[in-house]
Image (spheres, rainbow, N blue to C red):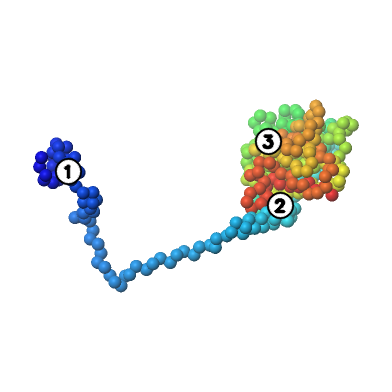
């Protein structure tokens, strides 16, 4: 067998015949060195210029490294600031009880829908679509059997309508465009007239482009007191809590913490809370320090009251609960989907408090 080195023109057959022996004969360092042979077409290295000495890069300025305690103190300060600001003042208040005017025994409510700027939390303003310049819209409270007229005036740039959610009305008053009525176009007025049927905690809201219109604020509470009040619980505070989610974030009665409103009661008093979910997500509402007694769902009495401290409120649902305020203090009250209520900057969104004095 020839000991001659393989040339670049060695045939495949010759390579197979001599390759193994040649591979063993070539020192590893020689093989690695052969990989560094300069290509004839490679650009020549530029001549060395002493005047152009490499200047070492200046290290970038780095932020001082915080200790674990310093990081904790920064986070804690943000949490504390939010708590101390509660309840923070903001422009506008929603869910205000609306007084009707009487016309020949009919309770008349004028609802004008228009675009406004709404302050959700301190310094946080968003475009809203509102009834009578408030989010939620005015709270309507009537009695079972009342004759009611609602005049809807549309000052928006698109059509709308009102659906009275939970009320068992004649179909012509159900407020669903192209099913029960034409849409109320910009600049138009539509009159809803009804004899109030079933009692309970109900709602009213847009049912036209509802994903956008309701999320932006076209919603409100419609409370119907029963004719026969003998079965109604005796309460000291009757509080409506409208939940919503969407472009305004997670809100309670149109505001996000720390601008939410606390519920205030005296020791020994009973609070009735009427939950209403106008959003698109489930919100399990959790009260610290005391339990809730559930008495009604969607306006209908429960067969037997039952107790809980966290109550799941699904979209469209209304739940009525009683809280016996027997534990003094300021008690956190929030949605227990924690990303709706708290993060590293502190509490926000669906957080309020029950204050028992």
Measured in 3D between alpha carbons, the distance from the residue under mark 2 to the one under mark 1, in whole angstroms, is 81 Å
Q: Is residue 62 visible?
A: yes
Measured in 3D between alpha carbons, the distance from the residue under mark 2 to the one under mark 3, in whole angstroms, is 24 Å
From the image, tell me which residue sits under label 3.
315
Quadrant position of residue 201: top right
Q: Earlier in the sequence, mark 3 or mark 1?
A: 1
Q: Residue at x 84, y 49 (%)?
A: 357
Question: Residue 38 versus residue 279: which sits nearer the camera?
Answer: 38
Quadrant (top left/top right/bottom left/bottom right) for the N terminus: top left
Q: Are dots 2 and 3 in contact, CB under 8 Å?
A: no
As drawn, 219 above or below 44: above
Q: Residue at x 81, y 31 (%)?
A: 305
Q: Earlier in the sequence, mark 2 or mark 3?
A: 2
Left or right position of 58 against 49: right
- Determine crowd level at label 1: few under 14, some 14-19, many 20+ residues with C-alpha closer than 10 A: some
Q: Residue at x 89, y 31 (%)?
A: 230
As drawn, 22 above or below 306: below
Q: Furthest residue to the left?
A: 2
What count of labels does the image hold? Answer: 3
- Determine crowd level at label 3: few under 14, some 14-19, many 20+ residues with C-alpha closer than 10 A: some
Q: Position of residue 298 (x, y in %)?
A: 75, 32
Q: Secondary structure at mark 2?
A: loop
Q: Mark 3 or mark 1, which is nearer to you?
A: 1
Q: Secondary structure at mark 1?
A: helix
- Determine crowd level at label 2: few under 14, some 14-19, many 20+ residues with C-alpha closer than 10 A: many
Label for residue 258?
A: 2
Q: Are dots 3 and 1 in contact, CB under 8 Å?
A: no
Q: Position of residue 64 (x, y in %)?
A: 54, 63
Q: Mark 2 or mark 3, which is nearer to you?
A: 2
From the image, tell me which residue sits under label 1.
22
Measured in 3D between alpha carbons, the distance from the residue under mark 3 to the one under mark 1, in whole angstroms, is 79 Å
Q: Position of residue 209 (x, y in %)?
A: 63, 38
């Amino acid at each position: 067998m020839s000991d001659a080195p393989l040339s670049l023109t060695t045939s495949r057959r010759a390579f197979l015949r001599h390759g193994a022996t040649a591979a063993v004969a070539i020192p590893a360092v020689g093989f690695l060195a052969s990989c560094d042979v300069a290509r004839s077409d490679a650009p020549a290295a530029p001549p060395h210029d002493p005047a152009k000495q490499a200047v070492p890069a200046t290290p970038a300025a780095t932020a001082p490294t915080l200790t674990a305690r310093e990081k904790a103190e920064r986070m804690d300060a943000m949490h504390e600031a939010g708590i101390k600001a509660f309840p923070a003042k903001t422009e506008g208040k929603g869910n205000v009880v609306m007084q009707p005017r009487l016309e020949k025994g009919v309770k008349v409510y004028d609802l004008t829908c228009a675009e406004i700027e709404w302050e959700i939390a301190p310094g946080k303003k968003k475009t809203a679509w509102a009834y009578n310049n408030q989010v939620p819209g005015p709270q309507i409270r009537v009695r079972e059997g009342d004759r009611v007229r609602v005049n809807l005036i549309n000052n928006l740039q698109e059509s709308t309508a009102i659906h009275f959610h939970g009320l068992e009305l004649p179909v012509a008053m159900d407020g669903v465009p192209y099913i029960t009525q034409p849409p109320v176009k910009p600049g138009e007025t539509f009159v809803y007239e009804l004899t109030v049927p079933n009692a309970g905690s109900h709602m009213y809201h847009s049912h036209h482009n509802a994903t956008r219109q309701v999320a932006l604020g076209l919603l409100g509470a419609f409370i119907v007191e029963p004719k026969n009040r003998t079965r109604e619980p005796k309460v000291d505070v009757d509080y409506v809590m409208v939940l919503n989610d969407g472009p305004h974030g997670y809100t309670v009665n149109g505001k996000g913490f720390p601008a939410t409103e606390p519920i205030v009661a005296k020791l020994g008093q009973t609070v009735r809370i009427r939950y209403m979910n106008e959003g698109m997500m489930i919100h399990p509402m959790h009260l610290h320090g005391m339990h809730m007694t559930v008495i009604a769902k969607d306006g209908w009495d429960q067969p037997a009251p039952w107790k809980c401290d966290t109550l799941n409120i699904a979209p469209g649902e209304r739940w009525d609960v009683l809280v016996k305020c027997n534990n003094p203090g300021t008690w956190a009250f929030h949605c227990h989907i924690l990303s709706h209520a708290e993060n590293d900057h502190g509490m926000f969104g669906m957080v309020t408090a029950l204050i028992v004095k």
